[in-house]
Every structure is written in structure tokens, then in C-alpha cells.
Amino acid sequence: MEITDDQIIERTLAGDTDAFSLLVRRWERPIYGLSLRMLGRDEDARDVCQETFLAAFRNLRKFRGDAKFSSWLYRIALNACHSKLRKNNGAVEHSIDQEDEDGRKFELADDGAEIMPDRMHRDQRATAVRRALQALPAEMRQVIVMKEYEELTFAEIADILNVPVSTVKSRLYTGLQQMRARLEKIRGAL
């Protein structure tokens, strides 16, 4: 039987500081993924991920358990992402655009290239989707990331953002519409 987040928190608060590393291992990938999709740069996402877990550890006694630990942790991560975006004047870096899902670098195909056309088309589509996502306002981007990539429920997202479920749905719908419009423009330009 897997130990729950609440049990790990109890152990940590009881003085077993090594227990917190279990929470880090459990939640590091989702927090990093959220941060990367919000910020667009690996380096910034790693910084935010580290800041998130440091803040969570320092403030663990303040966690009341009213919400799930994961919701509290996502909220900390989103706050750190928003701080980073404010420092960058809202600009999202696009260095991620030249990497595939495994972090390998690639060049966008020119019209004459015939080597691995399926891979190139897939890479181009992935790049276009990342650019369209990064172009959205942060409040829409975060909802899309949490719903589509992190697979959170509307209720979980509403809890994390402290907004009504209807607001989450509205931001998701509007954000996806804007992404779709940008992707259609890109497709029409090719």
C-alpha cells in the first residue's frame, strides 16, 4: 500500500525531514512540467520547481489540509511562475521550440527535405502547438496546462486557482479557441 501525501506530511512535521523527499520524488515531474509549459524554458522551470519545493518545505506547518496537498503545491508553483513572468515583463522564452518531447534539438524542415517526413511534420506540429500555448495570457495557459497536460479535473483546477469551476471552463474554452485560431493561421501560411 502506497503511503499518502498526508502521511508523509505527518512524518515530516514529526521531525523526519527525510520523508519530505518522498513528496519531492512524487510531485517533481508534474510541477516541473507545469512550470516548463508556463515559462517555456528548462532553466526557468527547474528554478521554479526548486523554489516550489523549498517554499512548501518551509511552509509545511501552514498547510491546513483543507485542500489536497497537490492543489496547495500547484498553487505555490503557479505563484512562482507568475513571479518569474513578472520579472521577465510577461515575456515567455521560446527556447523550447527547438526541442522535441525528449529534449533533443531539431531544425524545422525546409520544403525540399525528404528525410523522415513524418517526424518533421510531428515536430513542426509540436512546435506550433507550443508557440500557440505560450502566446496565450497566463490565466488561460495555466488552465490548459493543468487540464490537458496534468489531467486535473475542473474542480481541482478551481481549487488550485481559487476561482469558480465556471471560470475554469470559460478560460479553457477561450484559450483553446485562441490556440485553434493561431494554429489555423500557421497552417494557412504553410
Image: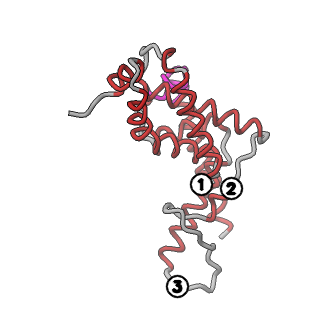
Picture coordinates of residue 35, whole percent (x, y):
57, 42
Left or right of 119, for residue 128: right
Count the marks: how many? Answer: 3
Picture coordinates of residue 17, whole percent (x, y):
43, 27
Residue at 49% of width from left, 38% of height from top?
A: 146
Picture coordinates of residue 15, whole percent (x, y):
41, 21
Q: CA distance from mark 2 to mark 3?
A: 25 Å
| SS label for mark 3 | loop
Query: To which quarter of the image does residue 38 belong?
Result: top right
Amino acid type, mark 1: Arg
Task: Answer with mark 2 or mark 3, whichever residue precedes in sequence.
Answer: 2
Task: Answer with mark 2 or mark 1, whichever residue precedes in sequence.
Answer: 2
Amino acid type, mark 2: His
Picture coordinates of residue 129, whole percent (x, y):
58, 56
Tell me the residue that label 1 is attached to: 130
| SS label for mark 1 | helix
Q: Residues within 10 Å of mark 1 (few under 14, many from 20)?
A: some
Query: To which quarter of the image does residue 104 belong?
Result: bottom right
Q: How is the image coloured?
A: secondary structure
Is residue 178 rendered magenta in the image?
Answer: no
> As rendered, which of 58 and 62 lies closer to the eye?
58
Q: Which residues are magenta?
A: 155-168
Q: Which mark is residue 115?
A: 3
Left or right of 163, for residue 152: left
Tell me the residue that label 2 is attached to: 94
Cβ atoms under marks 2 and 1 closer than 8 Å: yes
